Image (cartoon, helix red, strand yellow):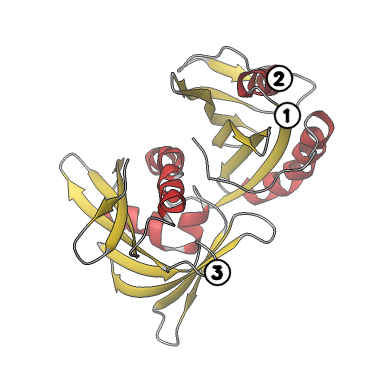
Amino acid sequence: MPIKKDESGRRYVEVEVEVPGTPEQVWEAIASGPGISSWFVPTTVEKDADGKPVRFLASFGPGMDSVSRVTSWNPPHKLAAESEDLGPGAPPIATEWIVEARGGGTCVVRVVHSLFASTDDWDNQLEGVEGGWPAFFRLLRIYLAHFAGQPSAAFQLTGWGPEPKSAAWAALMGSLGLPGKAVGEKATASTTAPPLAGTVERVGEELWPEELILLLEQPTPGIAHFFAMPMGGQILLSVRIYLYGPQSDAAAKRDEPVWQAWISKHFPATGGGAGPCGP
């Protein structure tokens, strides 16, 4: 969506999603370290002596930490924070998270990113931040529908393939033994891939077909999220695994090295770097 502007010089984007759960359940998922880490990226929340959150530290990978300073805290409805995520010389980003209860046991989660600038120099970065949320919102919705409040452990891996994106995606799905799957279909990874089995929750849409989400049964109940995106003349292939339940931590520690060895063998890094969060 295009950047919105107002007369004060504020430039902003906003995205929202409707999710199952009470405001308290949704707040736990978006405003606590364990909750956020269960569907987003590993996140810790620093608190002051009175137990009030003062900073969020989110890790997107080695050397890619995001630090946000809490500026407003009103559970379970609204929080605000400020970060320097756009880099040196850029204005700070102010982010608001708003939770609104709806009928039928659901809530709307709205995220608003704002900055003040007299030029459009940072509009592309702001749009990039906005563009990462739809994929994570899909994971948030699944997490709240099936796993809210459960112990969790997660890991993310990155592989690389040559362009075009469709060919790199086909190679990833073929290596996993998961090509051509449809929503609702049972899926089991090939015997040459790390153990993985579940039900297809989502396949990519026409504008971005290179995405697959599985509701896992093996190695533990959980979510597997695969997608492909162009970056620096190559194709980044992302594998995100979120595991839930009392065995999740042990399973993640056991399986992450297996997945890392597998993806390093089949889709080794040849350059590139970090980029947007997903489709």
The alpha-carbon separation of the residues under discs 3 and 2 comes to: 38 Å
The alpha-carbon separation of the residues under discs 2 and 1 comes to: 8 Å
At 31% from the left and 66% from the top, the residue drawn is 79
Q: Position of residue 201 (x, y in %)?
A: 46, 25
Q: Position of residue 68 (x, y in %)?
A: 46, 69
Using the rendered image of the protein, determine whether residue 237 is visible from the camera's viewpoint.
yes
80 vs 146, nearest the viewer: 80
Q: Amino acid at mark 2?
A: Ala
Mark number for residue 171?
2
Pick out the residue farthest to the top: 180
Pick out the residue farthest to the bottom: 49
Contact between marks 3 and 1 (CB within 8 A): the answer is no
Q: Residues within 10 Å of mark 3 (few under 14, many from 20)?
A: few
Of callouts 3 and 1, which one flags the residue occurring earlier in the amino acid sequence?
Answer: 3
Of callouts 3 and 2, which one flags the residue occurring earlier in the amino acid sequence?
Answer: 3
Using the rendered image of the protein, determine whether residue 247 is visible from the camera's viewpoint.
no
183 vs 271, nearest the viewer: 271
- Left or right: 80 in relation to 173: left
Q: Amino acid at mark 1?
A: Gly
The alpha-carbon separation of the residues under discs 3 and 1 comes to: 31 Å
Residue topped by disc 3: 88
At 53% from the left and 45% from the top, the residue drawn is 277
Of callouts 2 and 1, which one flags the residue occurring earlier in the amino acid sequence?
Answer: 1
Q: Position of residue 100 (x, y in %)?
A: 21, 53
Number of the front mark, 2 or 1: 1
At 66% from the left and 28% from the top, the residue drawn is 196
Number of the front mark, 3 or 1: 3
Q: Residues within 10 Å of mark 1 (few under 14, many from 20)?
A: many
